Amino acid sequence: MSHPSAWQTHRQYAATAARWTADRWAKEAVRRRTLRAERKPIVRDAKKALAAAKALDPHGITTAVHTADRALAGAKQRVPDPLWLFASKSAILAATSAYVGLPLVPGRVWVWSAVAVAVAAVGAAVWAVVHRPVAPDIEPTAEERALLGRLQPEHWREHAEQRGLAGTLTGRPVLTDSGIVCAVRLDGTWTATKLRAANDHVRALLGARTDLRMETKAGKEGGWAQLTIRTRSAADGDDLTWTPERRTLGVDTVTGEQVPVPLGERILIAGRSGAGKSIASRPLLYDASEGDTHALAVIDLKMVEGRLWDHRARVASTPMDVITLTDELVAEMTHRLEILPKGQDIWTPTPAHPRITVVVDEGAEVMSACQKVDIVVGVTDKGKEITETVSALTGLESIARMGRAACIDLVWMTQKPSMSGASAGIPPQIASQVSTSICLAVKTPTDARVVLGEDAQAKGWDADTLQAPGFAMVRDGTRGPAPVKVRYMDKAVVIALPPQPIWTRTTTAPTATAAPVLTLVKPTADPGATPAPDGADARILEVLLGVTGPLRQKDLAETTGLSKGAVSKAVTRLTARGRITRDPDGGLTADRAA
């Protein structure tokens, strides 16, 4: 290598080392400035506390003065020197040590010291090349630059008082994949809850737009809060269209992780009208109806969402359908719990006895329409119908309390979580059993507390500020209050899903050893054909054809073991088809020629 080339190489290495040193110097200077800005107010407070203690006890009789003095000394120790002062002290210390100690060092030590310095220099050069600082991947937008500047402690201190935020001071803000995060120091008159209530003042100080989501929660240490401004999302750029390969609930907007909602949980899904409850629930409904050990039942009095799933799910869309379905589910649950092997606490799903997920779409409607339903249970001698009032709510509450062990899980959906009375969004007996809450955008903080817990607001679960539609908060005991961007599953995708066996429960005639038999019935292939009797219809016809005289409806319920609601519904269908006739005295007879 020629002398000019060698000189050029040395210059390049020197320039690289200089840039690296300057970069490290700048970062250390920023770090020290940040710590000084955060901790110098603590020193001022400690000085005030010491002055107050001395005023109360000028002779130092009590321990208050000594305690305050130690607190002040500790606070001062936590405040680092500016980098220039630290470097000056280090240089003076090194020069003094060299002046005093170097003449006493033997020559052999000088030689080995030179070797050590050379080796260290080479090692440092290699380390600098290998660990070259990487330029930050996150480039702030113009809006973020403005917010970062206004969050600086100097700007905040200057404008906080006129915005009603005197007594608060920000640390150095940090730009992350999910927005700007900044610690806020609070004096004795402030708490994280009070700062959250003053979000409008914070927004005015920062000049932030009104639709920009801001989150305030308690910091990791007492006297501090954490302010997060969601200028961006970790879910940005992800394809959130649902496919069988991407079947999670959605993506965490803070960490970018997939958020699953496993089966086997009692789930509450809430959100105001238009928040996207149906879309958010569709991945769950797919999982609940996929496979030979899963069965789905949908209670939908609006007859909209349930109709999309009627080729994969048992759908109840009238109060009578709901009564019949809940009676069958309770009977199935009771049967499973009765035969559950000793020492086993959870039912093992099988194709004959699958896991059943019961989805109640718009629980307020079910509460209003199905709490008291009159069904016909017989006819008097004069031909007058005998009715009995039944309720689906009792069965649904039993499923919420005991269904988990029998692998019969309840999913309750509502847009009125805080309503009470006959049209309540969720019954208290069911609300107390919920293990996973999925809250989309709701109207009020009260709704958010009902769904996510009384401590929701204090811990950052402010679902009333979520965007709608498409965002939710999931509280299951393992996650923090980070919004989740839910996947989109189109109606056409649901309709195009392949059919699945539909669950229904029938029983044999009651004998000493007979047990309920569960069957899976597929939808009829020809919608225009005369429907064949289903399990309940066939059982009633079998009983009526097996006797010589007429039977009353009440006797049919006792003989077949079916619920009164199921018998009433089956008798109505069979009478309309001409398969059975009702005598004037109420007796039922099968048409043997049909």
Image (spheres, rainbow, N blue to C red):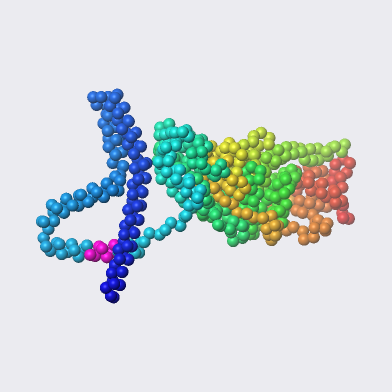
Answer whether residue 510 is visible to the viewer in this image: no
Task: Quarter of the image for the C terminus: give it.
Answer: bottom right
Q: Position of residue 265 (x, y in %)?
A: 58, 48
Horizontal and vertical percent position of residue 251: 55, 53
Using residue 371 as the reference point, say whether residue 578 is left or right of it: right
Q: Magenta: predominant secondary structure element?
A: helix
Left or right, 497 with respect to 219, comes to right
Give the residue drawn at x 88%, y 55%. 593
Q: Position of residue 250 (x, y in %)?
A: 57, 53
Location of the N terminus by quadrant is bottom left
| Quarter of the figure with residue 558 | top right
Q: Does any portion of residue 566 appear in the rendered image?
A: yes
Residue 290 in magenta? no
x and y percent of residue 149 in the render? 44, 45
Q: Nearer the viewer, residue 83 or 363?
A: 83
- Extent of the magenta region: 118-124
The verdict on residue 122 being magenta is yes
Which of 3/516 is in front?
3
- Judge whether 57 appears above or below 334 on screen: above
